[in-house]
């Protein structure tokens, strides 16, 4: 039974979150090791194209025949910046970092907290691409929210300390950042709440769920 997913990623935070998610459905995640320089990330305007291109290159490095291989590409899309940094999220994080993002949005302030959240609206998007041995499946997830006016917390990774998720409604769906819901971080960033609560909102969890809806996990007909 094929219950190991080989995840091509250099990001330990993403690896840990995916492992946590797959453990819930009885599957194991292992990092797919490839030689340095083996994977070239294309310049593309959408996450799907990037994920698919990386996955196709990863197929040359299967750990064994029939292995399940996954790539997952995520980005932070800020409304007031027309979706920037989006597909450039890694580069922006490596260069200006969270402090730079906070500075970039410094002018978007309001005494009205609802208006402030609207002005600073952003979302995480994730696209997971899985090679199931025969074809490539895609899963997509989004998490709405807003960018904090200062760095908050040191849990998680990447942009977690500046991203405040929007509350969730009864069905677990993201509301707009200015609406109160039944699940809330009460204005705290992902970096201040930790991984368990992040998981309930997470774009990554949603993308992996979307992916696994298309893939019969262990114990079913596969
Ligand atoms: P791989 O491509 O090797 O998997 P990466 O770190 O480049 O690793 P992404 O392209 O998916 O991963 O992510 C783009 C940037 O967005 C990068 O700086 C991440 O740290 C950040 N990011 C992705 N998911 C995130 C999340 O759930 N929380 C905070 N930041 C995240």
Image (spheres, rainbow, N blue to C red):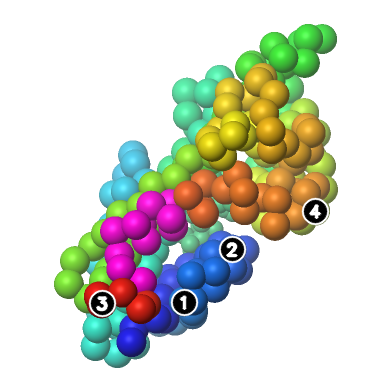
Q: What residue did someone put label 3 on?
A: 222
CB atoms of marks 3 and 4 within 8 Å: no
* Prevailing secondary structure class for the magenta stretch in the rendered image: helix
Q: Earlier in the sequence, mark 3 or mark 1?
A: 1
Which of 168/204 is in front?
A: 168
Quadrant where the image shows the N terminus: bottom left
Indicate which disc residue 17 carries: 2
Q: Earlier in the sequence, mark 2 or mark 4?
A: 2
Q: Based on the picture, tell me whether residue 184 belongs to the magenta stretch.
A: no
**Distance between the alpha carbons at the discs numbered 4 and 1:** 29 Å
**Distance between the alpha carbons at the discs numbered 3 and 1:** 13 Å
Q: Which residue in the rendered view is the most extreme toward the bottom?
A: 64
56 in relation to 207, above or below: below
Give the left or right position of residue 112, taking residue 64 as reference: right
Identify the residue at image location x=72%, y=36%. Answer: 184
Label 2 packing within 10 angstroms: few (<14), some (14-19), many (20+): many
Query: In this rendering, does residue 104 appear at all?
Result: no
Which of 80/125 is in front?
A: 125
Give the left or right position of residue 143, taking residue 188 as reference: left
């Amino acid at each position: 039974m094929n219950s190991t997913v080989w995840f091509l990623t250099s990001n330990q935070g993403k690896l840990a979150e995916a492992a946590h998610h797959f453990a819930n459905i009885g599957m194991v995640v292992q990092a797919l090791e490839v030689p340095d320089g083996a994977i070239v990330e294309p310049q593309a305007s959408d996450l799907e194209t990037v994920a698919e291109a990386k996955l196709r290159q990863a197929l040359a490095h299967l750990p064994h025949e029939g292995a399940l291989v996954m790539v997952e590409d995520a980005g932070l899309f800020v409304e007031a910046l027309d979706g920037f940094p989006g597909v450039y999220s890694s580069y922006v994080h490596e260069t200006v970092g969270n402090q730079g993002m906070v500075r970039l949005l410094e002018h978007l302030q309001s005494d009205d907290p609802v208006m402030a959240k609207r002005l600073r609206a952003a979302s995480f998007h994730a696209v997971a691409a899985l090679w199931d041995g025969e074809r490539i499946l895609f899963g997509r997830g989004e998490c709405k929210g807003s960018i904090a006016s200062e760095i908050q917390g040191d849990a998680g990774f990447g942009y977690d300390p500046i991203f405040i998720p929007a509350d969730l409604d009864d069905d677990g769906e993201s509301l707009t950042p200015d609406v109160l819901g039944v699940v809330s971080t009460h204005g705290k960033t992902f970096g201040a709440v930790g991984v368990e609560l992040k998981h309930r909102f997470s774009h990554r969890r949603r993308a992996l769920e979307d992916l696994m809806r298309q893939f019969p996990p262990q114990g079913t007909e596969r």
